[in-house]
Amino acid sequence: MPDGAAPRRPTALVIGASAAGLLAAAALAEFAEVTLVERDALPAGDETRRGVPQARHAHLVWSGGVTALGELLPGLVDTVVARGGRLVHVMGDMVSRAPNEVWFRRFTTTRHRNLVCSRTLFDAVLRERVLPHRNVTLQQRTTAVQLLGGPRRVTGVRVHRGNGTHDLTADLVVDGSGRGSAAPRWLVDLGLPDAAVREVAAGVAYATRLYRAPGSTGSTAFPVVNVQANPAKPPGRGGIILPVERGRWLVTLSGTRGGEPTGDPDSFLAFAHGLGDPVIGELLQHAVPLSAVHTTRATTNRRRYFERAGRWPDGFLVLGDAVAGFNPVYGHGLTVAAQSALAVRDVLATRALTAVGTARRLQRAVARPVSAAWDLAVGQDVFYPGATDTPPTLLDRLNARFVDRAVTTGARNPRALGALLDVMGLERPPIRLLAPDMLLAMLIGPRAPRLSAPPLTEAERAAARPATAPPHG
């Protein structure tokens, strides 16, 4: 290096400009020159795009993800809220029925707040924040087709763009391309063993429709309404009303094998009425549809255990849905993506991006938030018929009984609810439920009687009716 010359800044290449890729780019931009490779043309605003079909369905960011976003991209959450998103108190601003059919009382905790908005708004704000960064370059309409390098080190990516193929080199390649990731095949092509994989498929199908909020609910802070499916009573059917920006309700209904919703608009309302509680159907009675019904079946829990690989190449990292895709009913995908990106930043704050072994350390770091969300999802879905090749083990059943007891206690005890939300919000590991305050609450029993109906106030129900409708009852 000539005297006085600045040291070369490391380079990173991120495959995929969806949420996981953008968040990874934000983390890496502090330490490297980052190139984002995206096969689609990104929209200018909050519009859906072909590469993120799940954007039409309900999304939220749990409290652990809100915290991670605040550390990684200060002010981003405030921008989403300023443009119509909401930070809702869990469970104070939610009407929620747990899988064991217990209604949560609406206690308001001070720490646990979820970010609620449409996925298109979240992605638009994220693009606006990350893409203008001086250390980030975007290459659109560019498809990664092959890793460069060998089994010891990945040195870049071969991409297809227009009518030609080009090689892009980088010190670190990050695959954030989602459920359809080619990373397992690419690693095998380099001479590395295939990664261990596990699938738990509850057979969930989703149907989502956008509505104009009925009555005066569009101008009020109407609660999120969530009826979760019960794995003990298959087929498991559930649904959620997510009040989003511009006075709209994003309504997602779900069902497992033998009880799936369809894309038929004439059946949507009837399916909502047929859930374990009809509250969603009742609230939609006077809502005006704004869209067709959009469906998906890409809901299998699938995890690839890259962090356990006996050999792992330097210069390569996989994160987001390319590592683990979760049943969307639990809403943990965006939270895990934010926490994984923060884990990348934390590792690189103490270790050089180009150092031998850094990629393996990064892969193990992003596995921690993945594991927390995986355990929560699989702990429920494993009980659906046909979800796995083997029936639930005794340990699975004991864990499920303990969690049911914790949920029943948290639904009626504010202190226990705080502990439960620490885990559900991915702020603390599941061992939090074994802390003395939680165990004592479970031993003594709930403080309040069990609710027999969803805890909507009469004012909230009235707000969902047209102004000329007669009073309920």
Image (cartoon, rainbow, N blue to C red):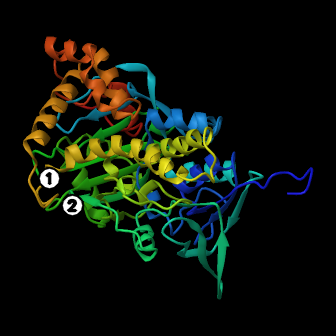
Which of disc 1 and disc 2 is earlier in sequence?
2
Report the residue at 31% width, 48% height from top.
329
Q: Position of residue 68 (x, y in %)?
A: 53, 36
Q: Judge by depth and name the residue closer to the eye, 380 or 190.
A: 190
Give the residue furthest to the bottom. Answer: 163
SS for callout 2 = loop
Q: Position of residue 386 (x, y in %)?
A: 12, 60
Q: Judge by depth and name the residue closer to the eye, 34 or 3.
A: 3
Which amino acid, by three-letter code, is at mark 2? Gly
Report the residue at 44% width, 77% height from top.
189
In the rendered view, tell whether residue 232 sits above or below residue 296: above
Q: Position of residue 130 (x, y in %)?
A: 67, 50
The residue where tag 2 is placed is 203
SS for callout 1 = loop
Q: Position of residue 258 (x, y in %)?
A: 13, 62
The residue where tag 1 is placed is 384
Q: Is residue 143 left or right of residue 386?
A: right
Does the image show residue 289? no
Q: Is residue 300 left or right of residue 74?
A: left
Q: Judge by depth and name the residue closer to the eye, 7 or 21.
A: 7
Q: Quadrant of residue 413?
A: top left
In the rendered view, tell whether residue 443 sits above or below residue 196: above
Report the residue at 65% width, 88% height from top.
163
Instruction: Sort mark 2 into few (<14), some (14-19) or many (20+) by Cα contacts within 10 Å.
Output: many
Query: Quarter holding the C terminus?
Result: top left
* In contact (CB < 8 Å): disc 2 and disc 1: yes
